[in-house]
Amino acid sequence: MKLLGIVDTSTSFSYNRLLMAFIRDRFGLAFDFELIEIEELPLFNQDESREQYPILQELTESISAADGIILAIEEHNHSLTPNLKSLLEWFSYQQSPFKNKPIMLVGASLNEHIPQKAQEDLKQILAAPGLKAWLMSDKPFFLKSAPAAFDENGQINEYDLITRLANNLQHFIRFIHLADSFTEK
């Protein structure tokens, strides 16, 4: 099974990046895991083709090849980041590699707040006619107070958090199999 991890970040150090690296390193034997970042995307312009941009071509190939996507989201001003919004716009126009693609949300925050508003916006956008992705909305994994959750080696240091993450990932694998059984071949 191939999973694609997409990190939405605009900073040189990111707890979302650290969380995705932890998923790759800790659970990577259970599935093939590709990790990409969306920090330098062109802003969506309907008059342009995504074929003009190599980064969008690479993303199209990676998304299409994945059985499921783990999307690490950030929230800026109670909304999606401009990078993530632009990514979704590029792939909602014309043919979408997100169509029928199972998606799990994860995120790490500096404080006690999770990206609730961004998560709600994302649910609506992913269900839009141009994307038609399948969001596993019952088991997102959001890590509050990330600075305290990671040790100096980038490892989650609480057994209960690791167990919850493992359970959510197992649930996502089952969700992918279920979604696959509903997809026309």
Image (cartoon, rainbow, N blue to C red):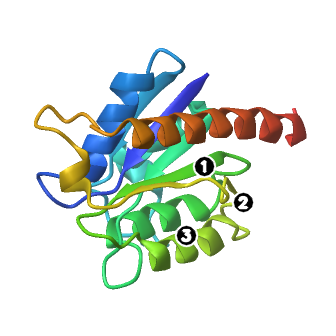
- Residue 125 seen by the camera: yes
Q: Which mark is residue 103?
A: 1
Residue at the top extreme, as displayed: 29
Distance between the alpha carbons at the discs numbered 3 and 1: 11 Å
- Which numbered disc flags the more N-terminal residue, 2 or 1? 1
Q: Residue 132 carries which label?
A: 2
Look at the numbered disc 2 and give the secondary structure of its residue. Answer: loop
| Residue assigned mark 3 | 122
Quick check: 51 left or right of 41?
Answer: right
**Which x, y percent locates residue 82?**
34, 72
Q: Label 2 neighbourhood size at 10 Å, few (<14), some (14-19), many (20+)?
A: some
- Please give the name of the residue rendered at 32% of the width and 43% of the height, measured from the top-left corner: 19
Look at the numbered disc 1 and give the secondary structure of its residue. Answer: strand
Circles 2, 3 touching at the beta carbon (< 8 Å): no
Q: Quadrant of the C terminus?
A: top right
Residue 121 vs residue 83, the one in the foreground: 121
- Which numbered disc flags the more N-terminal residue, 3 or 1? 1
Circles 2, 1 touching at the beta carbon (< 8 Å): no
Look at the numbered disc 3 and give the secondary structure of its residue. Answer: helix
Three-letter code for the amino acid on which mark 2 is drawn: Lys
- Answer with the quarter of the image where residue 39 lies: bottom left
**Which x, y percent locates residue 169?**
57, 36
